[in-house]
Amino acid sequence: MRHTVSMTPFITGTVLCGLLASASGQPALKEVFNKDFLVGAALNPWQVSGTSHTEARIVEIHFNTITAENCMKWGVIHPRLGHYTFEPADRFVEFGQKHKMTVIGHTLVWHSQTPRWVFQDQEGGTLTREALLERMREHIFTVAGRYKGKIKGWDVVNEALNEDGTLRQSPWLRIIGEDYLVKAFQFAHEADPEAELYYNDYSLEGRRKREGALKLLKTLQAAGVKLTGVGLQGHYGLEQPTARDIEETIEAFAGLGLQVMITELDVNVLPTPGGGGADVSMRFSADPKLNPYPDGLPQEVEQRLARRYAELFEVFLKHRQVVSRVTFWGVSDRSSWLNHYPVRGRTNYPLLFDRNGQPKPAFKAVVDLRRTTSDTVD
């Protein structure tokens, strides 16, 4: 899901030593869930380069899969016609290979963070269907082809649906038509026949959007394209969606014979205007009432967050036969996109590691849950 977050190093020798000491006394998440599913995080350049030593170390210790948060989106990797910027993506892939991690590419086709020129001809007019298909094909073959054999799977199409389950009126849909999704998956498979291919979206736990997604995925399957799985982004709140909503969603997509992945997991603890979700176009003005915890999370809310994470992982574990991956959208609270979405400059606490890279009560809650969970799947 998102985007550019201002990030500066926040490491000192004392903090790093503290992190390593705490990490050595804490079980690694990838080991705790090694019989269940992959556990990972979305990364940005400061983690991959080691500029943020604390977060880089968390990733090395706790995760066995990584997703490109921003460096493979069209606007970053292909900012101008005929010009690609591969260095950030190359470093991301090299980091994953160095640490023997499962590397996930995000994303090949999306309505957001795609430059306007993609849909325009040299005079600034709208491209024809054939010209845009060729531009899509060239982009997918160049990007997915470059990392062939290095990336396990791709989020081929991201967020193609409205909240009511209808297809989003993106330039892809308006210019090409509904079969742009089929074409995207066809091109991705041709570019890397061995790669897993996913559809990824948010708020699929809502009944109408879930029904729309099921219809869409059945259409892709009927077209004969390779479709490995569906990503539930997992941008959740402290209460919504309910555990039952999530469970029903996992069961519905598993019923299509698909892998189910939790691809962008975080839990928003702040009041959020607009009803939540993850529509990146949604923006609101700063208001102190929307940033109630600038100096730290009250213990009561910290415990609610811990209980919520335990509840979520209980659902994931129950369905571990079909849930193949759980990826957090960020590494620590400090670098979470939710500090700037949908209101800039807030202080949010959505992940398992705090701003100093220390494990939170939510971390302990999910570890303790796994320790008390039977290895027998219900």
Image: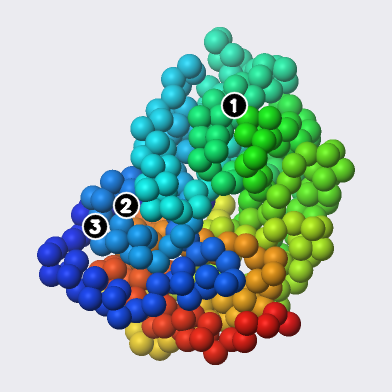
- Report which residue position mark 2 lands on: 47
- Report which residue position mark 3 lands on: 53
Q: Nearer the viewer, residue 147 or 83?
A: 147
Disc 2 element: helix
Q: Which mark is residue 141?
A: 1
Say whether residue 107 is left or right of residue 19: right
Q: What residue is rendered at 64% in x and 24% in y?
A: 137
Disc 3 element: helix
- 130 lies above or below 191: above
Q: What residue is rendered at 82% in x and 45% in y?
A: 221
Q: Nearer the viewer, residue 119 or 43?
A: 43
Q: Nearer the viewer, residue 371 or 256?
A: 371
User: Where is residue 178 shown, x and y percent of the image?
Assistant: 78, 35
Mark 1–mark 2 CB contact (< 8 Å): no
Q: Amino acid at mark 1?
A: Phe
Residue furthest to the right: 222
Say whether residue 82 is left or right of residue 289: right
Q: How packed is label 2: few (under 14 Cα within 10 Å), some, or many (20 or more)?
A: many
Q: How packed is label 1: few (under 14 Cα within 10 Å), some, or many (20 or more)?
A: some
Is residue 237 in sight in this rendering? no
Figure quadrant of the C terminus = bottom right
Disc 1 element: helix
User: Where is residue 126 shown, x and y percent of the image?
Assistant: 64, 18
Is residue 320 in sight in this rendering? yes
Distance CA(mark 1)–CA(mark 2): 27 Å
Q: How packed is label 3: few (under 14 Cα within 10 Å), some, or many (20 or more)?
A: many
